[in-house]
Amino acid sequence: MASKGFFTKSFLLYHRILHRNLSIGKLYRRTLSAKLPRYPSQSTSPPSFYDISNKTLVIDMDEWLLKSNSIFPYFMLVALEGGGYLRGLLLLFSYLFLYFFASEELMLKVMVMFSFCGMKVDGFRLDRAVLPKYFLENVGLEGFEVLKKGLKEAKGVVCVSRRVPRVMVDGFLRDYMGVKEIMGREIGMKYGFFSGVLMDWNEDKLAQKMEDVGGDVMAFGSCFGKYSQQRPFTEIYTTTEQEKKNWNTLPQDMYPNPLVFHDGRLAFTPTPMATLAMFVYLPLGIVLSVLRSLIFGLLPYRLSIPLSSLTGSRSYLVGQPPQYKTGTNRAGGQLFVCNHRTLLDPIAISAGLNRPVTAVTYSLSRLSEIISPIQTARLTRNKEEDRRRMSTLLARGDLVVCPEGTTCREKFLLRFSPLFAELTDKVVPVALNTRVDMFYGTSTSIFKFMDPFYFLMNPRPEYWVEFLEKVPTEGRSIDVANGIQRKIGEALGFELTVLTRKDKYMMLAGNEGIVKA
Ligand SMILES: O=P(O)(O)OC[C@H](O)CO
């Protein structure tokens, strides 16, 4: 009897909490939007946005900066990239289940729980390595203009994330938007792990922060309760999701800091439906990946290229591959110098030439070496030793070198290490590009050996190979290397940088990317 009473009470309590979450949460949002003045979406700047030198801007990231209010994809990225497929699947099912009856707050708490519970705090880098790309792709130009003006002219700018926890937005706001004052909800931690419990929003902390920064406060996106009651804001601007649909997306060339590096396997925004589609496709993707690996590993190119195109992959050869001819070089073979998109670059070049080549690498897993259809040789990062190894290989036949030393996913070229220019009289620059639609075939994680399989797991992976005019290697090797970087950059329309492998690994993985020889 007692237990029956207990269950009845528990059920009623559960029902009351659910009902409160369900109705109050939604009502609050409606009242909030209805009360506040709207920022007309067709206007390029808010009405009295002239002199803001004595003002503090409080910008709600979710409501004002981002175009779409849907935050599920960011949690799915954390779950999949930080936890794995099982965690992703749990998050997806719980979301789909709760979608029809839970309040926004309840959904948020569940998403945080499934994405973070048990994840290590130390070394959590998803906010810097993975999430910024997706936030950037969702920034509305109109909202961004306000932030940009604020950062340039206002007394202070505080960016607030009321829904997405601070630990997820910090890297994006700090590294890519240039915001220094960031406030968001915290996630509980215990013994160095995230507990997955989402803490309540701390209005007092925000009020204190605004007091510290000083000046009149202008709010964008949402009203900030306590503070505005004590000291009314000078202006409040809000907008609706419907209005934001008409906003423009921030173009890539307007990113305050360019997105050169990012990590993570997913190459699409994991909305609930897109994630579901990926899970359904996954078994077929694995079969395709194995099949394509076997095709390229066992068959000659004249058969493997048409056969793999039957499986959906595409390769394009632009320009005429150089004729097989030795003599002009001091060494025996030709030296092909390419930009680096994936581990499969040398194979793509070999297929374009329709003859075997040797590839030099810095960090190839044993598995990749074993299954590689072309010969590979390791470099050591010791200049003299690498020069000796490359010269020996070049004397034996054609050699492919990727002087960037690491892959780059975006339209940028990293610094070209000049050692290759000291080996031979002429080199053949090769411009490479790839396209993936579901998974990236590169990573900085410990599962790097899976990189080529992920590339081949895409429904329609694509490779472009363009052989450029031979270039003489006269003059200083660094000038030759820069000249070839420029030529490849022009061919691809990519931007040149002086960034290195070390820069990439420091940013994405927190190490220098050094692999034992
Ligand atoms: O895995 P990445 O992107 O560091 O590139 C690996 C290169 O192939 C090293 O030679």
Image (cartoon, rainbow, N blue to C red):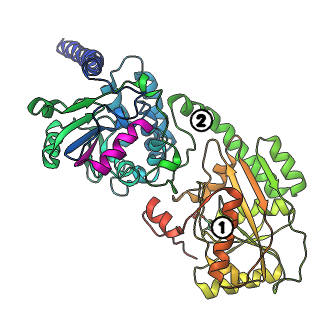
Q: Distance between the residues labelled 1 and 2?
A: 38 Å
> Sequence-wise, which precedes: disc 1 or disc 2?
2
Q: Which one is nearer the viewer's eye here, 481 or 509?
A: 481
Element at badge 2? helix
- Outermost left residue: 230
Name the residue that disc number 2 marks: 278
Mark closer to the observer (1, 2): 1
Q: Is the magenta stretch mostly helix, strand or loop?
A: helix
Rendered residue at 17%/14% (across/down): 2
Whether residue 509 is visible: no
Image quarter hosting the N terminus: top left
Which stretch did the figure color magenta?
140-159
Please, what is the three-letter code of the amino acid marked with disc 1? Arg
From the top left corner, tell me how far across and down residue 408 is, in percent. 59, 59
- 287 with respect to 260 (left or right): right
Relative to 291, does residue 334 appear above or below in the rendering?
Answer: below
Instruction: Classify residue 37 by image quadrant.
Output: top left
| Residue 158 belongs to the span the image colors magenta | yes
Instruction: Classify residue 448 by image quadrant.
Output: bottom right
Can you tell me whether the CB of the residue at mark 2 lies under 8 Å from the nearest atom of ligand 1?
no
